[in-house]
Image (cartoon, grey):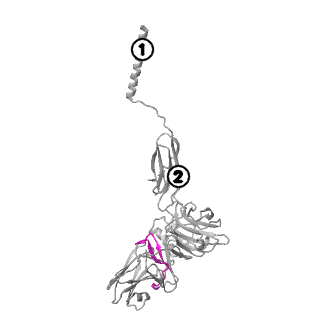
Amino acid sequence: MRHRHWLVGLCLAVLVSLPAVAIINPDFAPEQSYSGAGDEFPGPEGWILRDLEDRRALVSTVEFAQSGERVFWFESLTRGYGDNKLEQCAPLTDPDDIIVSASVWTLTPDSDLRLRINVEFYASLADCLDREDEIEDSEGNFNIDGPAATWQAISYPVSVPGGATHARVSLRGRDRSDDGDPADPPLVFYLDSVQVAGADLANGDFEQGELTLASFGEDQGPFGWVLRSVEDQGLVIAEPTAAGQGAAFVFTQLDEGFGDNTVEQCFAIDAFDQFNFAASIWPAETDPDLRVRLNFDLHANEQDCLARANRIDRFDTDFLTSDMTMGEWNLRFSETIIRPANADWARIALRARDRRDPIPRGVSSGGLVLFDQVQPWRLLPPELSPPGQAAGTQPLQVTLTSPIAGAELIYTTDGSDPAPGNGTTVASGSSIILSEDTTLRVAAFRAGWVPSEIVSGFYGFSEPVVVPTLSRMGMLLLALALLLLAGLSVSSRVLGHRH
């Protein structure tokens, strides 16, 4: 099976640009896909897409965007510049010269991965839009071979011919990295910060316009993900109640087997000894025969994970939607395993199946099951030492530790749940002193991880037995008083004897 460029990209991103333990796009951030019939069709706001045929372009929300939160990219490059074109007619503000600039980012730099900037000049907006009566054109080709995962600045100065009022700016991509043909899987680059000094270009950072829907077929997928199998389509949809960034993923049509709808990605897991992951699941309907599976396969290395070869082990955790709350987000965890020493990569997968009879059809049913907030690693619970006491008599030192390095601990003593913003934050290994009855509640937190379960311990203190003590001066005074009393007693007996 042919695995597309974003599956390679997500694994490289783990190695090159993101923390070693990271799921790419865990919240299915908003995206918009663009496709259409004919030579031209609308693209991102202000732009036109031309000559894509059955290929697509996307605007995606990503962490590495240069000027905002979004980037533009062609989904599938070909060996020629003529098959992927992003264009806009911009009114000129400088009658003599313009400078077209753009920033390009890729995980797979190559001298045969290239961007072409083409500029056509026209005497009117109508001529520019219709591409008629062109006055002059100019083009520049640029290798995308700078450092991986780094924005590469490209600049192309052009002289404006006489009589021109508008420039049709065209950005085109090609890939000839495999002996003159596109690589398999094909390479991809991302565009941001497109500007034209000397002309009014709109939406060069792709931040304008709503991102409401992106659809994907087999071997495609949301940014960082790939649909290995799909009955109909997978969608990233705007979802006001989404657990993450206001978008969620859904399969448009479920079938009887978990293997019929699978969205997945690979990433490195060699930094930790235990592994699990979680996902938020939103069922539009609940039924024992409508089920979700969280699956992961273990592999020795990146290449095996990408190729789905030489699997070391496989773990499936199944959930009945009848055990979930309908119309709400339900957080579910996969099985937790001890990572085998030879398993450094995991391929995680979200799957769903429907064995009801008959199976409801179409997105009109709500898409049946939505996915969001896919997170690796639930932190192990913190440890309290001692774990509690019933009736102590002296102030007690309690040490709080986490078995996971880098975790922060938050504790409360008022009975409330520890959480960021509620409680006292301390480092693992810290100690606190208790001297009165206290219920200590502690949880572990770390960025990119699911918080641990809350651990509680009760520490009781009985009423101390107070033993009076006298100072040295007090004891001396007491002794004098006793001597005085003894003397008085003797005197009384003597006097009594005389009488």
User: Nearest the camera: 177 or 351?
Assistant: 351
Is residue 135 toward the left or the right of residue 428 in the image? left
Quadrant in which the N terminus is drawn: bottom right
Q: Quadrant of the C terminus?
A: top left
Tell me the magenta residue range: 56-82
Q: Which residue is mark 1?
A: 490
Compared to residue 400, the image places residue 263 above or below, namely: below
Mark earlier in primary sequence (2, 1) = 2
Task: Kindly identify the residue that appears in the image at 40 percent across and 90 percent down.
Answer: 134
Q: Secondary structure at mark 1?
A: helix
Q: Position of residue 337 (x, y in %)?
A: 56, 60
Any part of residue 341 in sight: yes
Q: Is residue 368 above or below residue 394?
A: below
What is the residue that sits farthest to the right in this orientation?
Answer: 357
The answer to the question of whether label 2 and label 1 lie on touching residues, with beta carbons closer than 8 A, is no
> Which residue is outermost to the bottom?
133
Query: Within 10 Å of the Cα at label 2, are there few (<14), some (14-19), or many (20+) other Cα atoms?
Result: some
Q: Label 2 to label 1, Cα distance in Å? A: 70 Å
Q: Residue furthest left?
A: 96
- Identify the disc placed on residue 455: 2
Residue 295 shows in the view: no
Q: Nearer the viewer, mark 2 or mark 1?
A: 1
Between 165 and 304, the residue placed more toward the observer is 165
Find residue 167 and name its label.
Answer: none
- Name the kind of residue labelled 2 in the image: Val
Look at the image and say whether residue 78 sits in the magenta stretch: yes
- Whether the magenta-drawn stretch holds residue 70 is answered as yes
Residue 122: name its quadrant.
bottom left
